[in-house]
Image (cartoon, coloured by chain):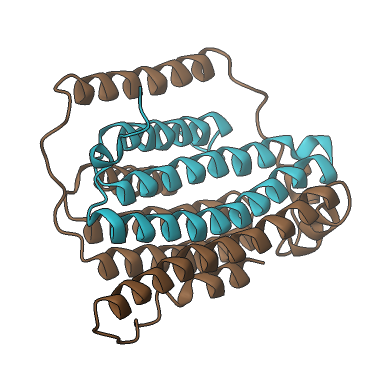
Chain colours: A cyan, B brown
């Protein structure tokens, strides 16, 4: 197969990364590894946005570049989320001496 | 197509490493591999500016922060026994169904083919100017909200860590062994500044 890689291939790859990240969120027991899997899901969404930005080049500069701009915003939000999330994790670890999510299940029904 | 195959293989192997490796440091390094491969994918997809940002902010600042916290907490290998025996097969089956569903939907309904002339006309240079035009134009509100979010993040991170430190100090002073706590997690605010 020659020519440029079709957008569908990138989006299927993105879906695979997202699903693997979701599997990590469901199966990992350490909170920090759950958090790593969430980062993987964020990046999968970014890959789909960048792939569709290229697909929508026919619609003009502003439409195509909005996709890449959203990725930029997602990156900034991920940075803020990681700073707060890891702060919470460190605080929990000091209290419980564990990051196992099963130890932190008091609020569940 | 060869580039795509290599990138996809490395990306998926790294992603599976994040999910399957029991050692947290190795899992984080595996994610760094996936993130760097994603940066190469962004170059292939005509987004060199985002590729640079991906390497600097994600693979650099964010993952270093992750590794820092994993090593600070001195986490060992994860407990391999699942809480519920059904959760692992259920998660893998659901994930497989998601991939199969998206793949089926996209293969049976392919979009229009890529237009090389339009791509050449739209994606010029590094993309910094075009992204900036959007960010300070239609996305101005998001830009301001992200600024507020980053400030909140800095305050929250410092507040979370500092409050605990003073409580520990009080407890130690009460126990008669007054000593100063080492400063906790200093790089957190700096990472937030990097991203802004």
Position in image of residue A66 (x %, y %): 76, 44
Residue at image location 28% in from the left, 70% down from the top: B72
In front of the other: B40 or A34: A34
In front of the other: B138 or B185: B185
Residue B4 appears in view = no
> Relative to A54, is A88 on the left or the right?
left
> Relative to B2, is A99 on the left or the right?
left
Total residue callouts: 0
Position of residue B74 relative to residue A41, above or below, is below
Position in image of residue B29 (x %, y %): 30, 61
Q: Quadrant of residue B98?
A: top left
Residue at image location 45% in from the left, 15% down from the top: B104
> Relative to A98, is A36 on the left or the right?
right
Position of residue A79 relative to residue B84, above or below, is below
Where the C terminus of chain B falls, by quadrant? bottom right
In front of the other: A20 or B114: A20
Position of residue B196 relative to residue B118, above or below, is below
Where the N terminus of chain B falls, by quadrant? top left
């Amino acid at each position: 197969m020659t020519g440029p890689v079709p957008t569908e291939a990138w989006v299927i790859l993105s879906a695979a990364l997202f699903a693997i990240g979701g599997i990590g969120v469901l199966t990992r027991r350490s909170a920090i590894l759950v958090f790593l899997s969430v980062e993987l899901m964020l990046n999968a969404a970014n890959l789909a946005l960048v792939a569709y930005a290229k697909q929508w080049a026919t619609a003009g500069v502003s439409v195509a570049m909005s996709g890449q701009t959203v990725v930029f915003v997602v990156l900034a939000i991920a940075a803020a989320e990681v700073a707060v999330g890891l702060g919470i994790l460190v605080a929990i670890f000091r209290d419980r001496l564990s990051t196992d999510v099963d130890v932190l299940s008091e609020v569940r029904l | 197509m060869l580039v795509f195959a290599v990138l996809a293989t490395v990306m998926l192997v790294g992603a599976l490493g994040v999910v399957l490796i029991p050692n947290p440091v190795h899992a984080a390094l595996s994610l760094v591999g996936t993130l760097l491969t994603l940066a190469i994918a962004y170059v292939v997809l005509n987004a060199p500016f985002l590729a640079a940002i991906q390497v600097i902010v994600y693979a650099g600042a964010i993952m270093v922060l992750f590794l820092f916290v994993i090593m600070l907490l001195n986490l060992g290998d994860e407990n391999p026994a699942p809480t519920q025996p059904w959760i692992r097969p259920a998660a893998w089956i659901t994930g497989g169904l998601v991939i199969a569903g998206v793949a089926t939907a996209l293969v049976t309904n392919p979009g229009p083919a890529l237009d090389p002339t339009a791509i050449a006309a739209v994606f010029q240079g590094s993309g910094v100017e075009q992204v900036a035009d959007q960010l300070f134009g239609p996305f101005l509100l998001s830009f301001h909200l992200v600024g507020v979010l980053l400030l909140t993040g800095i305050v929250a991170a410092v507040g979370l860590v500092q409050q605990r430190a003073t409580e520990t100090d009080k407890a130690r002073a009460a126990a008669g062994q007054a000593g100063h706590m080492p400063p906790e997690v200093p790089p957190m605010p700096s990472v937030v500044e990097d991203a802004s």
